[in-house]
Image (cartoon, rainbow, N blue to C red):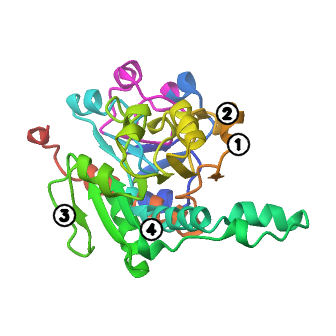
Amino acid sequence: MNSILISDRTHPVLAERLQEVGFDVRVEPDHDYASLIQAAQGCVALVVRSKVIIDRAFIDSVPSLRCIGRVGAGMETIDVDYAESKGIRCLNSPEGNRDAVGEHAVGLLLALLNNIARADAEVRQGLWRREANRGRELGNLTVGIIGFGNMGCAFARRLSGFGCRVIYYDKYLTEIDTRTLVERVSLETLQREADVVSFHVPLNDETRHYLDASFIAAMQKPFYLLNTSRGAVVDTGALVQGLESGKVLGAGLDVLENENMQSDSLVALNPELLTQNAVFTPHVAGWTVESKYKLAAVLADKIINALNTPYDSSRQ
């Protein structure tokens, strides 16, 4: 009973570290739901990404599991509560790509403030519009971060050199990283004072359409939006209306509401969104050469520790 199945493509260091401590590791990245259930029989640990939903039926079908690992941060494709009620440890590795996400969010913000994407497209067409592409300096703005875990904190650290004020709201945070010069505020204060709003939250019932028409209306100043978390955190229709009205000055989006996490593709892009001041990237904020290694290495260490440590149900 020392078999581990890695069911998606990841850095080889994950399998290597698990094998070094004596686990029998199989790497089989192309399973669908049904075939993954069969392949996982007898495994003590299963490593997944987002292409297969690990629901109650799946969990009940693989009684040998003691651990489910996620190469990345988001756990919305795993029924974590049910798994842990069955004594199965659920692990992810946000420490592995938080630096990448923090840097990418800064890049999106600078691109918006300085009209970089638009100016690049215009120059390629022979246009040389200097005044129309006059930018704004980040140092004069207040950046509001919603969600101050690994990703939000990494973003805040990278903003520290720009001289801007950084505030954050996190409903659940109990410990504060004192290495960042940031101010914890209420959501109402953030909506009153922020010039930029950046989302760094998981996707769940509470955060789905966090940014909607009501959120936009509650913002006291026109603002720039960043989303590097999950697409469904933002109500696309409300965002388009906010951009059209000028209440949202611009949007930097690494994720989109109609992104298909299971097939790693885009279903369709809202055509109205394309006409607005927006910068897009294809869910690559945490997708760097360095993060590919770190995501796998961090998860390997967590799995080894979990399988060598008795499960403490009092954590629930």
Q: CA distance from mark 1 to mark 2?
A: 7 Å
* Residue 106 makes an appearance in the image: yes
Residue annotated with mark 1: 274
Question: For the residue marked with disc 2, what is the amino acid?
Answer: Asn
Q: Nearer the viewer, residue 226 or 266?
A: 226
**SS of the residue under disc 4:** helix
Q: Residue furthest top?
A: 57
Amino acid type, mark 1 = Leu
Question: Residue 270: which numbered mark, if any?
Answer: 2
Amino acid type assigned to the residue bearing label 3 in the image: Ile
Residue 165 placement: quadrant: bottom left
Could you tell me which quadrant the C terminus lies in?
A: top left
Establish if 85 lies above or below 302.
Answer: above
Q: CA distance from mark 3 to mark 2?
A: 38 Å
Q: Secondary structure at mark 1?
A: helix
Residue at screen point 21% across, 29% down: 85
- Helix, strand or loop under label 2: loop
Tell me which numbered mark, 4 or 2, is placed earlier along the sequence.
Answer: 4
Is 142 left or right of 33, judged from the image as shown?
Answer: left
Instruction: Say which of marks 4 and 2 sits in front.
Output: 2
**Residue topped by disc 3:** 176
Residue 232: x and y in percent read: 48, 35
Residue 283 screen position, x and y as percent: 59, 49
Q: Horizontal and vertical percent for residue 187?
A: 25, 47
Q: Which mark is residue 214?
A: none
Q: Which residues are magenta?
A: 37-66
Give the answer, above or below, for where 240 lies relative to 22: above
Q: CA distance from mark 3 to mark 4?
A: 18 Å
Q: Residue at x 48, y 61 (%)?
A: 101
With respect to residue 24, does 207 lie above or below?
above
Q: CA distance from mark 4 to mark 2?
A: 30 Å
Q: Which residue is mark 4?
A: 99
